Amino acid sequence: MQFTDVITMIGAIAVFLFGMSTMTQGLEKVSSGRLESILEKLTNNVFKGVLVGALVTAVIHSSATTTVMCVGFVNAGIMKLEQTVGIIMGANIGTTVTAQILRLSSISSDGNFLLTLLQPAVLGPLLAVVGIIFYMFVAGGQKRNIGEIILGMGLLFIGMNTMTTAVAPLQNEPWLAGLFTTFSNPVLGMLVGAILTAILQSSTAFTGILQALSTTGAICYNTAMPLIMGQNIGTTLTALLSSTGASKNAKRTALIHLFFNVIGSVFFLVLLYAGNAIFHFAFWTEVVDMGSIANFHLVFNLACTALLLPFRKALVRLVERLVPGDKEEVELSAILDERFLLSPALALEKSRMAVVQMGRLAQGNYQRAVKLLEHFDPKEMEKLNEVEDSIDQLEAGLDNYLVRLSDHALTPEDSNLVSELLHTLSDFERIGDYVVNVAECAEAMEERSIEFSAKAKFELETLNKAVGEIIDKAIACYETQDTHLAAKVEPLEEVIDLMRDELRNRHIERLKAGDCTIETGTQFLELLTNLERVADHCSNVAMYIIREEAKEGDPIRENSHLYLHQLHEGGSDEGFDKMYGEYKKQYYSVLKEPVPQEVPPMFQEAEQKS
């Protein structure tokens, strides 16, 4: 074997690995988080878990990625430890699909046109050409992703074919036969397979390289089997590294993957070598080819699953003993697990969940602030400040998380979603800030023994109800991506603006008439300002949803400020005008009614909810 052949082989391995990585990335983008959702939802039954784990891994061509997803789900509290067992077992089965595809190299065409097309030497370049056309010249985000998949698959076949050609001169090298004879030692073979797979961080890549080397005729069954079993152990390193610094259950998930592969590999290695010692298998020293390696890889993983599936609960108890501790309470920040960055679509989905959680926290604080205006409680004020700290920390963590996510290759749609999330989390954080200002007004009134008149209390309660409704609608429309619900936010915001102006003018008149003090008036006007600004940010959130769903050329996409101005002028949207009229009657018109003798507790609904 010449020096140039070595360089060619190294380059072929690089092309092969790059093709696999490109294909996997394209498949993850096309899935848009759907594969992750399947993993998350369809695992209530262990047999479903095995099937789902196999299918997802067959699609993304990486058992390590599937297991890392499980570690992330468990760390975030989305999935229970027991649910991951079936998925991990199924992932080992799914990872054998690539080897079955690569075995096409060993199929003889015999002049058959269809079989000739399936040869990597022909199929690889054809797929690469089709893929690059889609990737570079066909418009549309999904078409580009499909091109990335096809291109990656083409590079995979080109790399495999080039590897096979590069190692062909090794057929006559006696040292290669001697090397693989050494690997027939089961312990050494497993160790080498595990180490090389851990370095490549892909059992599929190691199996592909082994298939290419099998074309030299130097690899026998007794050599290939320990190597294949060892690669099953080596692939667990990725999940083990992923669990570092994670919750105890996440560490247990990674250990389940390790023990499943180690126990299965050791059991069948002992079984095979003991069987050969007794029965002297005829195939033991026969030369393997690509198809034989692919078939053994499949049968071995099926057998491991059949062996250990009945003992899945014992496996869970084992890792729980090795990693002791009670079940941990999952923190909100766990939603932003670092492992999700490996799949941008999933990271975006979880980021949206965290943004919604921010909104819910701000809503809870609003309800506390309203109760503080009615009856101040220092403990409730302390709780409100603690929640506000959590909102600020989550906002900072989310901001950093999304910026890091932007460094990954994102589709134009995903990039727009990152921008929307950044704007929305800023709006929810600002809502939290204005709610704190409302609570601080309540605190200042308590410290100075200030109390509003019955009329002022009635006015403030009516405004609080309107603001409470707009917060609820803004969060709900964002969580469900409901444009019809989002359309109800802006007319309510316009009514809140009208109420603010009306109540400000009334209070100024009361100040002039001497019906209230300057100090009382200052707090009242401060409350009006903060409540109206809460409504403004709710309007922003709803507009993101409406603008996202609008078609190209719609006024809101061309100029949202002009669109809102035209809405507020009236006559441009019958639906808006109708809802504006309904909200005006519900809230603004109430201000014209006589003040009740006994003012009910402000925002009574909030008290009932909390």
Image: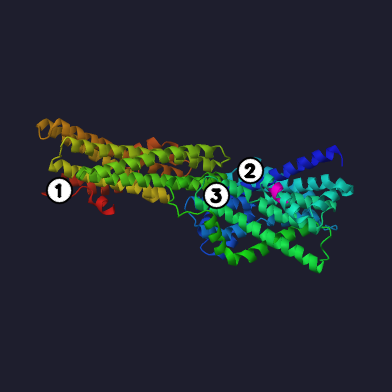
Q: Residue at x 65, y 59 (%)?
A: 263
Coordinates of residue 21 in the picture (x, y in percent): 66, 45
Q: Is mark 3 on a helix, strand or loop?
A: loop
Q: Which one is closest to the eye, mark 3 or mark 1?
A: 1
Amino acid, disc 1: Val
The residue that disc 2 covers is: 138
Quarter the N terminus occupies:
top right
Is 462 above or below relative to 220?
A: above
Real-space CA distance between mark 2 and mark 1, rounded to the nearest whole angstrom: 66 Å
Where is residue 267 shown, x and y percent of the image? 68, 62
Left or right: residue 86 versus residue 505 is right
Q: Which of 25 and 124 is in front in this view?
A: 25
State which quadrant residue 434 falls in: top left
Which secondary structure lies at badge 2? loop
Specify the amino acid type for callout 3. Ser
Q: What amino acid is labelled 2 in the image?
A: Val
* Magenta range: 193-197
What's the magenta bit mostly, secondary-structure-wise? helix
- Neighbor class of circle 1 (other Cα within 10 Å; few <14, some 14-19, many 20+) is few
What residue does disc 1 label?
599
Marking on residue 32: 3
Q: Which of marks 3 and 2 is in front?
A: 3
